[in-house]
Image (spheres, helix red, strand yellow):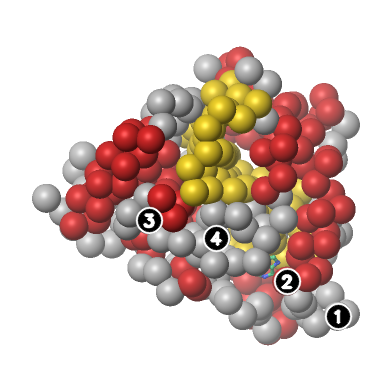
Amino acid sequence: MNEVYEKLKKCHEAVVAKITFKPELALVLGSGLGDFCDTMDVKETLPYSEIEGFPKSTVAGHKGQFVFGYSGGVPIVAMQGRVHYYEGYPVQDVVLPTRLMHLMGAKTLFLTNAAGGINPSFKAGDFMLITDHISPFVPSPLIGANIDELGTRFPDMSEVYSRRLRTIVENSAAAEGVPLQRGVYIQTTGPNYETPAEIRAYGRLGADAVGMSTAVEAMAARHCGMEVCGISCISNLAAGISANPLSHKEVQETADRVAPLFRKLVARAIADICKSN
Ligand code: HPA
């Protein structure tokens, strides 16, 4: 068996041995957004450290556990803390959690992240519905022998972020009175923030926001047939647009400031998505 798949299956066996909960939707919580779980009716939790072979998240502000429970009556699994490529893991490990949540039964992947705003009309604290992404600055998570059990060798990426889910999330935001920008996300490797010249270049490529996650997870999810949507919290203006040097502290402070609105938006969107399924 393919090594990557073998590791995934082992992690899945470890989850099945400890967890009985069956999620319909998987939610990945970005930097500073992990307290969404406080609004859930939590049934079970599983620290990543209890899953042998699972990559550990090392970022400040990321807890590192799966949280199983209900959000607005919908059975979900939430990731409090994700794994990033810049932590030194192979990209196949970075997407292991995504694939694991697919094996747990989640049909939908709801990605969230903190991102730097490139689009000049964005302000720190805005939310952006991800309409598409640009990923060639990070390796594809699908490099290596294809895992036929999950999906096809050459998966289509013409609609990574489902048009159907985008419409639902836009309606949820309008219903809750939460302003929602929309745009294209570009993933870099990190961990350094970008130079102003890089940000100008990414803007010309068509990116509206930049971050260090999400695109590879979305690609792995599409490969295994999950329906995907994503929201970025614009935690800062990107390098050269912002007058100040960038810091992780600023990213967390903005995420903390908008956390109540974010919780409202995501909770409503999850409920609306599941009503439509
Ligand atoms: N650049 C890259 N990643 C980020 C940023 C940024 O400006 N803000 C939050 N994550």
Residue designated by label 1: 244
Residue 203, visible in the rendered structure = yes
Label 4 element class: loop
Q: Up-down: is 151 above or below 154?
A: above
Question: Residue tagged by mark 3?
Answer: 54
Q: Which mark is residue 213?
A: 4
Q: Which residue corresponds to the image point at 83% horizontal and 62% vertical from the top-left?
A: 253
| Image quarter of residue 140 | bottom left
The answer to whether the beta carbon of the residue marked 4 is less than 8 Å from any atom of ligand 1 is no
Q: Residue at x 60, y 66 (%)?
A: 59
Number of other residues with Cα within 10 Å of mark 2, as a class: few under 14, some 14 to 19, many 20 or more: few
Q: Would residue 277 be found to the left or right of residue 60 on screen?
A: left
Residue 203 tag number: none
Q: Secondary structure at mark 1?
A: loop
- Gap in angstroms between the C-alphas marked 4 and 2: 15 Å
In the image, 187 versus 200, the foreground residue is 187
The CA span between labels 1 and 4 is 23 Å
* Labels 2 and 3 touching (C-beta < 8 A): no
The amino acid pointed to by label 3 is Phe
The image position of residue 161, as x and y in percent, is: 54, 41
Badge 1 amino acid: Asn
Q: Residues within 10 Å of mark 3 (few under 14, many from 20)?
A: many
* C-beta proximity under 8 Å, tags 1 and 4: no
Q: CA distance from mark 3 to mark 4?
A: 17 Å
Q: Which of the two discs, 2 and 1, sits closer to the camera? A: 2
Location of mark 2 (residue) = 248
Q: In which quarter of the view is residue 163 placed?
A: top right
Image coordinates of residue 185 in percent, x first then y, are 61, 57
